[in-house]
Image (tube, rainbow, N blue to C red):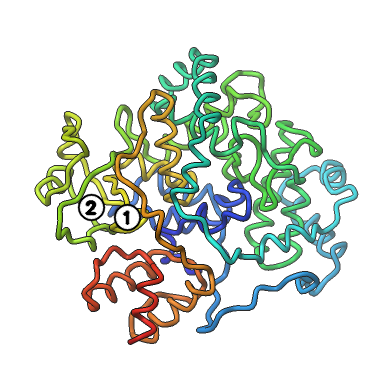
Amino acid sequence: MSSPDSYFLDQNTLFCISRRWHLRQLVAVSSLILLAAWAGKSTVAQAQLLQTVAVTTTPAIVVPVVPVVPTGDNYGIQSTQTFEQWRAGFRKEALAAGVNPSLFDRAFADITPDMSVIRADRSQPEFSRPVWEYLDGALSAPRVRKGQMLLKQYANTLAAIEQRYGVDRRVLVAIWGMESNFGSFQGTKSVIRSLATLAYEGRRQGFAQAQLLAALQILQHGDIPPDKMLGSWAGAMGQTQFIPTTYSNVAVDFDGDGRRDIWGSPVDVLASIAHYLQISGWQKSQSWGFEVELPNAFNYSLADGEIRKSVAEWKQLGVKLPNGVSVPRGYEQLSAALLLPAGYRGPGFLILDNFRAAFKYNNSTSYTLAANLLSERFTGAGLIASEWPKDEQQLNRSQRVELQTLLSRHNYDSGNADGIIGTNTRKAIRAAQQSFGLPADGYPTPEFLDALRNR
């Protein structure tokens, strides 16, 4: 996947077979770059995050055919040196960067490559999950009840965090729930072993070594012992699922115990999430957006993240809130984009700056929509009025690759045929839909794929 194709990359939907907490660390940099472009200009917060959340994405597959996904023993180590040789070389680099030799040796004691990390790094599921199914799980009644309870339990702490960082407390609790189910699932893999495996294996060497060095520096600072530094296969840690470089620059010690403890301190967890959103551009006392209805014969090509208009301008185009509800006071001049996560047949949303801030936490429209809706469910709101097109079949990965290949064959540049429906692919779909006389919502369907096959 190429970076320009990642604005509407919905990792939560695409990689539903993997656990959701694997994803942010693999796509953060491309999402932040594109969100800066989406906003029309870079902000100080965006520039800071581009430096601090340094993560790479999966290299693009530049072939116009369905790629073969390796299985079983085909997931072999590709390095030209032994793990011991790599470790010795990295040890020199770490010590030169100020890591204590004894700490390095203690952290790497009995560390060997983890083949499950390599398998996870290289695999893509064949089937994706539609957004409505993802939302059903993310907005489950038990999660809503748990969040409501925690809002009461940590009311005083959340008030202090809200005062310091200006981020809505309900959004903080919602992201906490989305990231680790309020701390109950943080990942079970050794972060040092996972990152060492990725650094040794070679595909993500630059990323993994930077994260590994940051992880060692965290250990040296005393925030967490090596055996407690657990997380995902790609190195996301704790209840916030921060990668080490993000932790180093964003995590805060809000409870004052001298440690930035995103593993065991809910106070530090909530404050660290708030700090991340603050420097991502969160606007105090503003909503993330709202559901809207579109008029008949609407120009669906406007549902593009790069097209932003004031709420008043969207109203002039016939966009309105459901059930005759008025736009909130003071929102007429706010800049918004139109989001159709399931195409023109599904619900629509006008998304504001705070949606973009939350999007930076996890590069997924489904995740961001779910987190914001969950924050509203805590108060009994957040219900979607329109129906989802649940009768619509989802394309599998092979079909998505075929669609991209056919688009390029018909001179609609969709980028690399990697099976990931991102910004470039959606633009190509819109262009083809317009030429075919179809609603140009940029949404891939079996009917559209058939139309391409018959051209």
Q: Nearer the viewer, mark 1 or mark 2?
A: 2
At which x and y percent is residue 38? 32, 55
Q: How many marks?
A: 2
267 to 53, vertically: above or below: above
Q: Residue 123 versus residue 162: which sits nearer the camera?
A: 123
Mark earlier in primary sequence (1, 2): 1
Tags 1 and 2 touching, CB below 8 Å: yes
Q: Secondary structure at mark 2?
A: loop
279 to 400, vertically: above or below: above
Mark seen at residue 38: 1
At which x and y percent is residue 294? 19, 50
- Residue located 32% across and 69% down the image: 427
Query: How crowded is the residue under tag 2: few (<14 C-alpha within 10 Å), some, or many (20+)?
Result: many
Residue 40: quadrant of the picture: bottom left
The furthest residue to the front: 391
Residue 368: quadrant of the picture: top left
Say whether residue 325 is visible: yes
The furthest residue to the right: 110
Q: Secondary structure at mark 1?
A: helix
Q: Is residue 385 left or right of residue 92?
A: left
- Distance, label 1 to label 2, CA atoms, is 9 Å
The residue that disc 2 covers is 308
- Residue located 65% across and 73% down the image: 69
At which x and y percent is residue 330? 17, 31
Q: Is residue 182 left or right of residue 354?
A: right
